[in-house]
Image: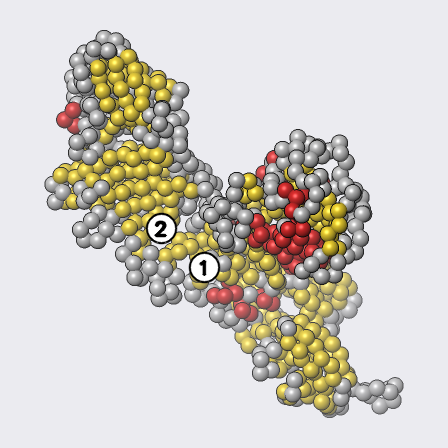
Amino acid sequence: MEVKKVLKTAFALGTGLAMLGATVMGAAAYDLNDYPSPFITAGALNAWIVVGENALAVDTIGMTDIATSLQLQLAPGAELAPSVQVLGDSFRIDKSTNFLEINEDLQDVISTLTDDDLNALVGGTFRAKDGSYDYSEYLDIPTNSASVQYTVDDDDDDDKHASYLHYNINTAAYTYRLEFATSAESDVVTTSGEQLDDFQDKTITILGKPYTIIATDNKTTTNGLKIDLMGGAIQDVLEEGSSKTYTLDGTDYEVKVVIISDSGTGTDTVIMEINGERTDELSEGETYKLADDTEVGIRDILPNEAGELAGGDIVSFYLGAQKIVLEDTNYLTVGTGDQEVEVNDNDIDDTAVAITATYDGKIKLTKINVTYTPDDDLYIPEKGKLSDVVDDPEQLFTKMIDVEFKGLQTGTTEEIELDANGDDKYKLRFTNDAGYNIDIPYIYCTGSTMSSGDGTRDLVKTEYCDDGAKGAAITTCNRSMTFNIDINDYFVVDSGESSYLLQYKDQDADDNTLKFVVEGAPSGSDTIEITYSGIAGNASGSANAVIPLGGKDFMVWISADSNDQAIAVDLNDDQSIANLTTLVMDTKLGAQINLTLLPEAFFVRSEQLDNDSYDWINVTATCASSVLDFATPGYITSTSSTTTPQAYATGWIASKDADSDDKDGMTRYGIYAEIKDGGSNNPDELTLTYPDDQVEALVYVTSGEVTTVGGGTTAGSIVGTSIFDSDLAAKGGLAANNVIVVGGPCANSVAADLMGNPADCTEGFTPGRAMVKLFPSATGSKVAMLVAGYAGEDTRKAARVVADMTKLQALADGVMEVEVSGANIENPVVTVVQ
């Protein structure tokens, strides 16, 4: 683990190794002058850009240059991989067997983060005066703390309906824990109060930042304990009268020690001047806020005593100081604590400190907990952070914890539409699992009566019903009249594997033929003509014909041997006619549309969710004065896969914003529903956008500076094309993908595979130089491009050459590798490697 963490920070993305042997990689199908082929094919992306999972943010710039350049080569509207990566010290709320769903509690996915998840939680060793104590750090995600929801931020005046990461009011958002493996012990001295002598002036690292314990106070009678810590961005020591300039967050600060006063009583003070601004007289442990809100903190004042060697008084100080006070009034009581964190003399609202310790003549410190519980609902929009919406950034302990919501990861989608056809008819449109665009005349309205079809052509959704009932609400069927499909009627056949919409077009008694049209089928296969023999008279005998479709034979019974007579069809391929059988139509991406017996209703069911349940949406039309409309669709998540549930909620759909009569909502699977308001004279219309796979909510816990790569879906935007090296295997590895690999073997395991995994990952690389090299797969069908240098800046120069393309495209045929060098990143030198 320690070696891994050293590598995360010590190596630049871009070290390399020797070439992989010809026995591993096959003959070249492409040269460098073919670029961007084969990574762009027919105007569409045909590759992944692979970056090391442990790459530092600065090392990803080259990868971003390449991704942006490739986008410009795409045909208009062509899609790149819908991927988002957060690079730096970050952890996505996700496990290999459980990603974060919409409406799912974060804690359901992971309850505690450790140093395996976030480097900032590395823990360490606290070296006290008389002993060393190992400690670990954890970040707990409490139950019901937060979830991603499609909702409205109650503080948004526009009432915009959108996806948010929502933190619940009065519910703990997180708990930071620091736990000692063996209790850290200290003597208690009573020179001034009850101080922990062994802890005084010792350093402990919290969330990756070192802090010095500048004061402690133990209260033996009440079991209270207070620990004052001080840290900062810059720590230094200056002598009285001296000055020095420091750069903090891009701003220069000239710091001068004006005077150090030795009181002789141990309470020494210092006055400092920063960029001309003079501080108050400060004692050890005190801070001063400059006009630009930068804090200066005093760690130690060391006056030169009489008889000491030459030298003036000195002060140890922090620039960008952070003084933290942790206090618990009763460390014997286990709980969330009753004292707030104090930072730079300010109490931080909604925080609580809980210290666990014992006292038997010595303090034995076991655990420190810090919990943040918001006193209001917090809504983090897409691309937002928790630090953007909290009342005080210090509520995120040490300002080294943050949570980022990167939106929803949605792949390919399709639409299921309920479109108005006039004011008295609805059509149901979608693409079926055979890829046919289906346009069903689903329902029409006369007076207050609804029937299936469009008024001239019925939609038959059941077997074994009489003519009078087939288009209206079906409750019973007359067995003596089984032929319910008339000329020009529509009907659905479903084999359990595929489903189709057919129209009965013709019966020719002279030729004994039946003709059907397959709706949406391509020209040449959209008409089925079959031969029949005999007549059934009723549907209890043998079938007179079969409709061959989708690898199945759907049986047909003929009512009479004359032109254009009614027929009966085994709609579900169970080899019989059964009373009140209803059907399911499968869409191209896997949704199921349940065609109910009632003409006004249908259900849409998702594929199985990550939690083994299903989303169901219920759509029910209404009819009044020959005008159609529909009620707000109901939604429920149910474990039932075949039986439509009964208890549907409607609150999931709301107005899109304060100024719109349109409505929308989203289910847990990620089905997006949008209702277009038809006004007072026209029916509303419904579009369900159904994703190929369940939508994943992208929530990251971060520490320190991170960089986001990806997001968006079309050419011309910053689109995610990148994956981590650890993700490539799940996508089939090098053999199944074209890849552009950024960075060398020390930082990118895919690069190591390409280079043969030698023991020394820097072998073959020279400072200031980088390579761009093609590696064809063993079959020659896939190509890997390696863009790697000795250091991160070298890799960036090579990536700039790839992004520019012109130097590669000017190369001669047969060139598979070039070396990139030169000090000017805007015009690097490209040399062919023979």
The 10 Å Cα crowd at callout 2, few under 14, some 14 to 19, many 20 or more, is many
**Amino acid beneath label 2:** Gly
Q: Residue furthest top?
A: 534
Residue hosting label 1: 381
The local secondary structure at tag 1 comes to: strand
Give the quadrant of the C terminus: top right
Q: Is residue 422 visible?
A: yes
The local secondary structure at tag 2 comes to: strand
Answer left or right for 642 relative to 148: left
The picture places residue 205, in percent across and down from the top left corner, at 69, 65
- Closer to the camera in the image, 431 or 636: 431
The picture places residue 342, in percent across and down from the top left corner, at 57, 73
The 10 Å Cα crowd at callout 1, few under 14, some 14 to 19, many 20 or more, is many
Q: Is residue 11 visible?
A: no
Residue appearing at x 48%, y 70% in the figure: 391
The picture places residue 298, in percent across and down from the top left corner, at 68, 80
The picture places residue 770, in percent across and down from the top left corner, at 74, 52
Q: Is residue 301 above or below residue 728?
A: below
Query: Tag 2 or tag 1, which sits nearer the N-term?
Result: 1
Residue 733 image-quadrant placement: top right
Residue 665 marker:
2
Residue appearing at x 75%, y 50% in the figure: 831
Residue appearing at x 33%, y 31% in the figure: 520
